Structure formats: structure tokens, C-alpha cells
Image: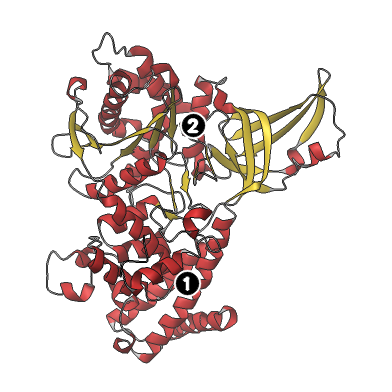
Amino acid sequence: MYTNGGEGEELVELNRCTSKFGERPLLMPVKTVALGTSFCLKKAYFMLMADNLPGSHTPYRLTATSQSLHDLLAYVVVPFTFRLLSEYSPRVGGGVDVDRLVDEVWSEVRGDVERYSNVNINYRDLRKTLVSMMRGYAAVVMWLVKYGGFSGDGILVFPERMIVSRPVSDVLAAEELGDFLPVIGVPDVVLVDRSSRRAAVIDWKMAGAGSGNELHYVQLLLYQHILGRLFGDVYAFLVYTTERRGTTKVVSIGRNVNLKEFGVSYDYREVSDRLERARYVAQLLYGLAFCKGMLRVAVGLNKSRGLGIRVFNPERGVGKRNYPCNYCPYKTLCRYRFSRKGELDEEIARLRRGFNKMYRIAVEKKSEEYKNLIDFGACVDFDQMVFKSPRVVELVKWFGREPRPLSDDVMRYSLGRTTVYVFGGDDPLRGSQQRGVFSPILFGRYEDDEVELRSVGGRSQLTAYVRMVSPVFSVRWLPLYMYYRIRPGDRLFQNVKVCKGEVPMNIELRAIAAVENSLVKMVEKGEDLHRWWSSFIKDLVLTAVDEYG
């Protein structure tokens, strides 16, 4: 974005705020930026501050059944892909028996899924929808091999792979912040072809065909743009099942792909014009988190540039049955948060100032966590990684000569008891900090007391272990374990890099939001704020502000 040409003070303010990103980084979920781009900036802000789970990508508030289906898709997609590729020949053509493949794959992975997954999966209840979704996925894979330049034996399959887009220093120093897109996301599936340097990103849609498609389109557009920094060509597809007819549908983003010969319904969406809007949304969300007056800036820029960013006002929708705010869970909080100072009771206005300070403290803490997300200055190299089980990885380093136990060569592997991120060896999706995009294949717990140096066949071997932190992350670990089991000798698992880091949490923001939301709802209902428990919460908030503000 340019600050010249009479753009006004709004753009200057926004650039001044985002130029501080290097000092106080904040990565926003791709889905949050997509929400602000496709629906409402203020709702995206509340999602960012209150409901944001770092690295989460699934639609908000999935039902238990949808969550089970989502995880099941992640567990079966790797073995399904390789079985599909072994049976499909682009020269011969024809289809494959998706029903049979799905059942065979489930029989293969069922034991590990039931033992290690943290989600209850009733395969019988989910099978019909699973088969329908995999039918759409199979059509995409077959099209990529036949027409999209993918080679069947060179495909890498990555479900639930974390991808980070972080502005590099020269972008932050420039007057034009056109590629300021600090996001973190986990696409449902990324397919990569090593030989052609092509990629495809695929999103499952759990909800009905007519609801929220625009959010998915923008989300896929953002992934497509980010991965475009690493690959020459990136395809993007949305796969879902229509509710009424139960038929599979695939929507291609950015190019018209004909899937008729593969037996699925298909469509095409051109949404590239949303990219500029999404970049502004990312900057404005960052500004709303750290700087004052950003809502005014958003409204001003929206008018001057015709960005099409929507900033709904709950007060304008009173009496309108279909006004979006009437269905928004943040309606009451939004009315309170963005009211003018004179429109609030003096005590409520004082509470809002207190909560604003607490939010700022929590966001600053979160910023420090993102600053230390991955410490690229504290990385060590291993020759090989080996899955000892679906939740334990052994790392192996060989030394040509036998080093002393306390030598620098050995001691640098003492990383402490810490979270680490593992980067694959020959991994086209790996990226780099310099490119502004990077993607570890795995993260977990590393402990010094498990590092061991021993002599093996006249050489020294150092081993260490990375362990899954919680069953919550089985949806990340299990698919990679399944890939390893199919291709244990893949170059992905050789010459890996392990870096210290952190897993950003959202506990403080959630706690503050929960207390604030409770108070706001009480005020909305006309309840007495001076009841003892309400006064206790109020005093706690104000005391905390005095203590830390």
C-alpha cells in the first residue's frame, strides 16, 4: 500500500501501526482473515481476540459428528491416495471403486485411529458421507495426474499440515505493504509433486452446500497465494456433499477444471479480486489488536478505496429480520465494544477501559509467543527420523569420528525440555524464514534426558526423541505416521532439522473475553451489576488493571 497520492491520514496510520510487526508480531488464522474478507471485519476481530485457536482451520463450532468426520478424513486420506494411485492409469482411463478403497483403508488404519485418536469415530454412521467426500477427492487426484502435470509416483500427501506466512523485514520496511499477510493455517490437504514443483490445496466442507461457501473460497485463495511463493503452479479445490441429493460436488478456485469424466459434479469460482481486500483485512485486524482508532481507519479506507470490506452495525439492523447482526453471537458484545464513550454508563465505560488494557496485556504476551514461535537460531540437524510408534519419533545423528561426550558437537543437541518443530529433509513445502513462508512437518516435546550417545559399529550415534504432547494433536501425527509406514525410506524423513519453539496459547484472551462477555450480557438484561459476585468480578478486573496496566 502506498502512502502517497493523497490517500489521507487513514493509510498513514495503518502503515505506522503495521510497521511495528517485527517488534510485536501477531499471526492470525487464515480462517479469521477469510471471515473478515467474506463477511464482517468486526466479527473477525472478535474471533481473533476471543475464539482464535492457533493453527486451527476447521469451520467454527463444529458439531461432534462433523468433527469426527473431519478427523476421519485426515486419517484415511494418505493411504487412500496411494491405493488410488496404484489402481488408476491415466492412459487406460476409467474410474476406481471408491467404496471398496475406503473400506479397505479403514480396515488398515482402524486400530491406530481407535487407540490414538482423541475423537470418537463411528465408522458405520459416517461411512456414507466419507465415501461421498472421497469420491470428490479421488476425482481431483485423477484429474491432477491426467491433466494437471502431477506424476503419480512423485506425489506427497500432507493432511493437517501447519503453514506459516510471516512478512519478511524488507516488506515491513517498505512504504508498500502489499504482501503483509501474517497468517497461520492448517489446510485440510496439501498435495505436492516433487518433480514438477506443483501443489494443490483441498478443503473439506462440513456444512450445507449453500452456507458459508464464500469463506471457504477466500480461505483457499489465501492458501493458494501463500503456497505460490514456493511453487510454480498451485491448484485449489473445495469438496463437499450436497445435503438434499447427497451428491458430491467439487468447486475449483481460480481456474475452470472439468471433472465430468470422473463422475462428480463440478463448478468454478473466480475470487482473485478478494486478495487485495484480504490483505487490507489482515492489516486492519492487526491494527484493531494493537492500535487505537483502527475502526475509523477501516471505514475511511473502505470508502476511499472501494475495498468492499463490511463493518456491520448492530444498531442499524433493529427491526430488520434478516440483518446479519441479528444472528451474530457477538451482537451484544459488539454494541458495547464499539459504542461511543458518551453512549455508555460511566461505570461501564470505565470497565471497558479496564478490559481494553487487559486485552492489550494479553495480546502483548501472545505477541511474545509468536516472536518465539520457531527459534531458527536454535536448530540442530539429524540424519534420519524414525517413527517408533504413532506418537514417538526417534531422531538419529551419525558422527564420522567419535566425539567426546561433552564436546560442542554433542552439547548443542541439549535443547532442554522444550517444544520443538521438525522440518522435513527433501520437502518442497518446507519453505524458509527468508521466503516468508515455512512449514514444519511435525511438532512435539523434546527432552534432554533422552538424548543418548553410543558407539555403533565403530561410529558414534546420537539419538533423541520427539513425543506427541497430547492426543489432541493425533490428527497431525497419525497421518504423517501413515505416510511413513507406506514410504519409510522417503527423503522427507532424512536430513531433518529440529528447532526450538513455542505453541502459542489463547488462555488469557479467552479468560478475559469470558468475564467481559458475562458482564455485558448482564447489563443487556438489566441485571444489577452490584450483586456480590458481579462486584467481585468487576473489582478483580480493575485490580488487575492497576497491577499490570
Towards the viewer: 177 or 497? 177
Colouring: secondary structure
Do we see residue 335 in this rendering?
yes
Point out the residue furthest to the bottom here.
346
Which is closer to the viewer, label 2 or label 1?
2
Do we see residue 247 in this rendering?
no
Is 496 situated left or right of 541 in this image? right
Identify which residue is drawn at 59% across, 81% down. Answer: 547
Give the answer, above or below, for where 147 lies relative to 327. Answer: above
Identify which residue is drawn at 47% across, 68% down. Answer: 511
Q: Amino acid at mark 1?
A: Tyr
- First in sequence: mark 2 or mark 1? 1
Give the answer, above or below, for where 249 lies relative to 31. Answer: above
Towards the viewer: 439 or 421? 439
| Tally of numbered discs | 2
Instruction: From the image, tell me which residue sits under label 2.
Output: 428
Identify which residue is drawn at 58% across, 27% down. Answer: 493
**What number is the disc on residue 359?**
1
Point out the residue furthest to the top here.
92
Label 2: few (<14), some (14–19) or many (≥20) C-alpha neighbours in 10 Å: some
Cα gap from disc 2 to disc 1, whole angstroms: 38 Å
**Residue 339 image offset from top left, x and y in percent:** 30, 80
Give the answer, above or below, for where 548 lies relative to 472. Answer: below
Towards the viewer: 256 or 541? 256
Q: Amino acid at mark 2?
A: Pro
Q: Secondary structure at mark 1?
A: helix
**What number is the disc on residue 505?**
none
| Residue contact between numbered discs 2 and 1, judged by CB atoms under 8 Å | no
Q: Secondary structure at mark 2?
A: loop
Towards the viewer: 1 or 115? 1
Q: Quadrant of the N terminus?
A: bottom left
